């Protein structure tokens, strides 16, 4: 029986803990856990991020007759294929990373997978990259994405000087992003001939298909597309690739280049301009950001 994984709310976690205590489950000591208990057929572990992992031969019975009836009050177990049959059909998922980060590349990622891979990912608690708080956890999830056989993964990105040249050519970030998505998707489709894909809606117009070589491919766009596990997998690949490239760029710059575009990024930009010269900022930063003009004027 595969482990069952679910992220609980604080209230649900407290309710579960009280249930386990009241029903005299045996307490365990598990590293990094908030609490852990077991009976002869089930082991329950809740971690500090409220991630619940249920293991043992009686997982299904516990989830259906205790967890969902007494704690969460939501029938979720085994219903993914009923509620979301499209998740389990072979298709492409697309996502990107770096769009809102001052330093480092814009990365477009395509993942193509079928129901076997989705079943595996769901059993391991796959979640989209924005829900992952640490780089270490991100890289672990990336390894899980790559584990199932037959999964196709492709990325598209450019070094920062090339990125800035491309932005000047396209004159619009969404146009550039659509072109990069089309590059990654076209390459992936050379390895797997699926007929459809899903992308988070970043513009109303179907810009990606304008750049796509395959005319018989249907690309859907919708808000919160990352609820689809294949799109979530693409978001993890895109973010992990971005983080690695940003680390490489930091080594080249000789200073830590932070994610985002907040105060830390602005301070790093000023330091970098003083260190390498403002004419060299194009090697590290997205030159169309308003922050760039503010630093150059100062």
Image (tube, rainbow, N blue to C red):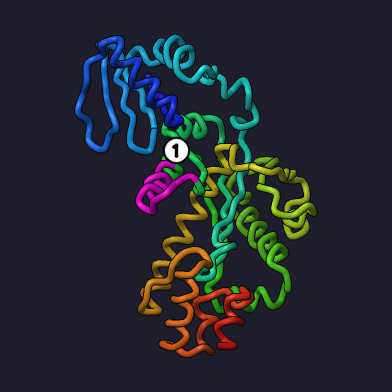
Q: Where is residue 211 in the image (x, y as percent from the top left)?
A: 74, 60
Please report the bounds of the magenta region as a residue range. 131-144
Please tell me whether residue 107 is drawn above or below residue 62 in the rendered image.
below
Q: Which of the image's four quarters has the N terminus?
A: top left
Residue 47 relative to residue 217: left or right: left
Depth order, front residue of 37/177? 37
Depth order, front residue of 130/110? 130
Q: Residue at x 54, y 54 (%)?
A: 154
Q: Would you name the residue on which mark 1 appears? A: 148
Q: What element carries label 1?
A: loop
Q: Which residue is drawn at 58% across and 76% down?
A: 291
Question: What is the magenta segment's predominant secondary structure?
Answer: helix
Q: Is residue 162 magenta?
A: no
Residue 249 relative to residue 78: left or right: left
* Mark 1 neighbour density, 10 Å: few (under 14) some (14–19) many (20 or more): some
Q: Which of the image's four quarters has the C terminus?
A: bottom right
Please tell me whether residue 115 is drawn above or below residue 165 in the rendered image.
above
Q: Position of residue 115 (x, y in %)?
A: 55, 30
Residue 62 relative to residue 213: left or right: left
Residue 213, visible in the rendered structure? no
Depth order, front residue of 153/281? 281
Please tell me whether residue 57 is drawn above or below residue 46 in the rendered image.
above
Q: Where is residue 76 in the image (x, y as percent from the top left)?
A: 53, 21
Q: Residue at x 61, y 49 (%)?
A: 94
């Amino acid at each position: 029986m595969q482990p069952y994984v679910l992220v609980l709310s604080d209230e649900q976690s407290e309710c579960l803990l009280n249930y386990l205590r009241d029903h005299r489950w045996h307490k365990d000591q598990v590293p990094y856990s908030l609490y852990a208990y077991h009976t002869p057929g089930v082991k329950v572990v809740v971690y500090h991020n409220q991630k619940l992992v249920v293991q043992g031969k009686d997982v299904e019975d516990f989830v259906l007759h205790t967890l969902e009836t007494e704690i969460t009050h939501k029938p979720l177990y085994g219903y993914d294929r009923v509620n979301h049959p499209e998740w389990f059909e072979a298709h492409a998922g697309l996502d990107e990373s770096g769009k809102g980060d001052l330093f480092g590349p814009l990365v477009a990622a395509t993942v193509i997978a079928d129901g076997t891979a989705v079943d595996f990912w769901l059993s391991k608690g796959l979640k989209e990259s924005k829900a992952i708080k640490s780089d270490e956890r991100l890289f672990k999830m990336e390894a899980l994405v790559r584990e199932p056989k037959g999964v196709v993964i492709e990325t598209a990105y450019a070094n920062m000087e090339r990125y800035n040249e491309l932005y000047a050519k396209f004159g619009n970030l969404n146009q550039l992003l659509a072109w990069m998505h089309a590059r990654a998707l076209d390459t992936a489709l050379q390895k797997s001939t699926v007929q459809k894909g899903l992308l988070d809606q970043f513009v109303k117009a179907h810009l990606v298909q304008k750049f796509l070589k395959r005319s018989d491919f249907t690309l859907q766009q919708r808000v919160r597309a990352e609820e689809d596990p294949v799109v979530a997998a693409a978001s993890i690949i895109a973010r992990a690739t971005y983080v690695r490239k940003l680390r490489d760029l930091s080594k080249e710059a000789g200073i830590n280049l932070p994610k985002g575009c907040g105060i830390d990024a602005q301070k790093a930009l000023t330091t970098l301009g003083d260190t390498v010269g403002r004419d060299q900022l194009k090697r590290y930063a997205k030159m169309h950001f308003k922050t760039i003009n503010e630093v150059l004027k100062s």
